[in-house]
Amino acid sequence: MDEKPLAFLPFSVGRRACPGETLAVMEVFLYVTTTLQRYRVLPEEGRPISLQSIPALILVVDDTQGLRFLPR
């Protein structure tokens, strides 16, 4: 699955592709995993998680979802 969809090319493709793409992807992965290791992610207090979506070509969430990050 090395082929990138044409709609998503933040680092370009081909000869002029960004040489830092691999590093950037690894940094984002480390940031997210470190955050998830240190905090419990819960929905906003008193508000259930809403999985309602608006019919569209892509998934569009009906409303914003508030999150709480509680230290583990």
Image: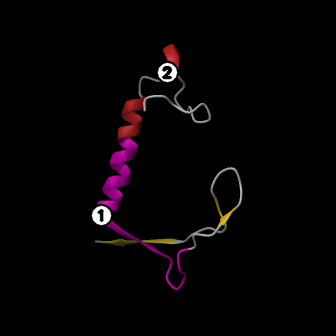
Which tag is nearer the camera, tag 2 or tag 1? 2
Q: Is residue 24 above or below residue 69?
A: above
Q: Nearer the viewer, residue 2 or 30?
A: 2
Q: Residue at x 52, y 29 (%)?
A: 11
Q: Residue at x 48, y 28 (%)?
A: 3
Task: Name the spot of residue 27 as percent of width and height, x first.
Answer: 36, 41
Considering every residue shown, the one lying at the far top of the view is: 15
Answer left or right for 19 relative to 49. Answer: left
Q: Nearer the viewer, residue 3 or 20?
A: 3
Q: Quadrant of the C terminus?
A: bottom left
Structural crowding at the residue carrying mark 2, measured as other residues with C-alpha within 10 Å and reported as few (<14), some (14–19) or many (≥20): few
Amino acid marked by disc 2: Ala
Mark identifier at residue 38 = 1
Residue denoted by label 2: 17
Amino acid marked by disc 1: Arg
Q: Is residue 15 above or below residue 7?
A: above
Q: Which residues are magenta?
A: 27-49
Q: Quadrant of the N terminus?
A: top left
Gap in angstroms between the C-alphas marked 2 and 1: 34 Å
Task: Name the spot of residue 16 as percent of width and height, x first.
Answer: 52, 16
Q: Residue at x 36, y 46 (%)?
A: 29
Structural crowding at the residue carrying mark 1, measured as other residues with C-alpha within 10 Å and reported as few (<14), some (14–19) or many (≥20): few
Residue 21: in magenta span: no
Q: Residue at x 62, y 67 (%)?
A: 64
Tag 2's secondary structure? loop
Tag 1's secondary structure? helix
Q: Nearer the viewer, residue 52 or 21?
A: 52
Task: Name the spot of residue 32 as percent of width and height, x first.
Answer: 38, 53
Q: Is residue 38 above or below residue 10?
A: below
